[in-house]
Amino acid sequence: MKQFGPIPPGFAARDGELVIGGRTASDLAHEAGDTPLFVYDFALVKARIAALRAALPAEVALHYAVKANPFPPLVAAMVGEVDGLDVASGGELARALQAGKAAHAISFAGPGKRDAELAAALEAGVIINLESEGEAHRALSIAKEMHVKPHLAVRVNPDFDLRGSGMKMGGGAKPFGVDAARVPDLVRSLFQAGADWRGFHIFAGSQALDAAAVAEALAASVSLTAKLATEIGEAPPHVNLGGGFGIPYFAGDAPLDVREVGAQLSAVLAPRPEALAATTFSLELGRYLVGEAGVYLTRILDKKVSHGETFLITDGGLHHQLAASGNFGTVVRRNYPVAIASRFGAPPEDVVTITGCLCTPLDRLADSVHLPEAEVGDLVALFMAGAYGASASPQAFLAHPPAREILINHD
Ligand SMILES: *Cc1c(COP(=O)(O)O)cnc(C)c1O
């Protein structure tokens, strides 16, 4: 038997069924027309944002990284809840604009922007976070051709990374951002070209659960940008400090202590470095805002025994929820939180392995977990499915249909 991660708060049982956003799993499956489906409870997202704002210094704006979950109704609901949207492709940019966010509150990062993506960003007037000198050159010449003033920030590849992060995106040789030592020259060339310089963007890593490590990376980002500002001789209007706030996917994981992060960030910003006196700050968070609010529901199609091991075979799989199968950036496969949604809260009686319907041994959704006895037709819930689920999985693999998605938003 193997452990699985903690079921996130906000999910209760009614009549022996899992309830999401006030609705039972079977009602939701019925409404969707078929399984599998992702359900996102926006009340949980709003509660998360409120708690976060209470923990963070009031002067720090909160941005949503659309990459975590670009489902259009979710992005639209986010518009009124966060101060900015951060996008990482032309497609995400289109969704952010479609959702109704003002252009000045959208920033566009990501290595390898096509000319057409740069042109769309310039046309809309959003902030482009430049990832290289070459990209700066292209953005400036496209802006000149279009006769628009470009709003440009520089993404800095810092000389540090976020300790304990699941995915390191700073420190050493990286495809992201411009090495810190070359940033002052690049910013001076933006001034010379007459661009509107919007400041800096630093993103040091992802999925960190240790408050001290997160606070340390934020403090290092503040001092690095202060040092760069001093060298340039001009205060950045804005600094996007990244974030990397993690969520507890696995057994033994404890939630990030955001009050501790907030307290340490307050101490870093008050008093803030002289060079950043007029600067505004933001954090850009993805999974921390939406990850725990989503559940992937899939139905058991077959139950079989092989060499004494019981397998529950579902109609879902890694083509929808790659991360839960352990094939999205993890070295050792561990179990995401899981439940039999149609027998939620019943005592565990059986040790089972839950797989998807794909013809590959990679398609394991839960390995040797202790759950209530389940039968063909029962619904399985995989939690922590609100981020990097439907949009981060190989939906075309094996030509199964895409997952359905439902946002529950009561206002
Ligand atoms: C992926 C990414 C994020 C979001 O990361 P989370 O771990 O979901 O918070 C934020 N900013 C940048 C630049 C990213 O690439």
Image (cartoon, rainbow, N blue to C red):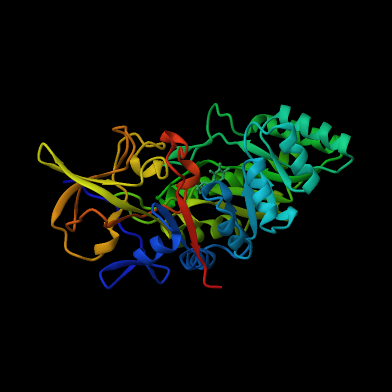
Taking depth in this image into account, of 138 and 322 the one nearest to the observer is 322
Q: Quadrant of the C terminus?
A: bottom right
Q: Is residue 268 above or below residue 142?
A: below
Q: Position of residue 342 (x, y in %)?
A: 27, 62
Q: Is residue 220 above or below residue 254?
A: above
In this view, the residue farthest toward the left is: 308
| Residue drawn at 41 percent across, 37 percent down | 328
Apparent side of residue 198 relative to residue 214 in the rendered image (left or right): right
- Res 151 seen here: no
Q: Position of residue 114 (x, y in %)?
A: 70, 32
Apparent side of residue 80 relative to residue 317 in the rendered image (left or right): right
| Residue drawn at 46 percent across, 40 percent down | 395
| Residue drawn at 74 percent across, 37 percent down | 118
Apparent side of residue 100 relative to residue 44 in the rendered image (left or right): right
Q: Position of residue 356 (x, y in %)?
A: 32, 42
Q: Is residue 112 above or below residue 233?
A: above
| Residue drawn at 54 percent across, 56 percent down | 265
Q: Quadrant of residue 280?
A: bottom right
- Res 89 seen here: yes
Taking depth in this image into account, of 311 and 136 the one nearest to the observer is 311
Numbered-mark total: 0
In this view, the residue farthest toward the front is: 33
Taking depth in this image into account, of 185 and 50 the one nearest to the observer is 50
Q: Quadrant of residue 322?
A: top left
State which image quarter holds ligand 1.
top right
Apparent side of residue 370 relative to residue 201 in the rendered image (left or right): left
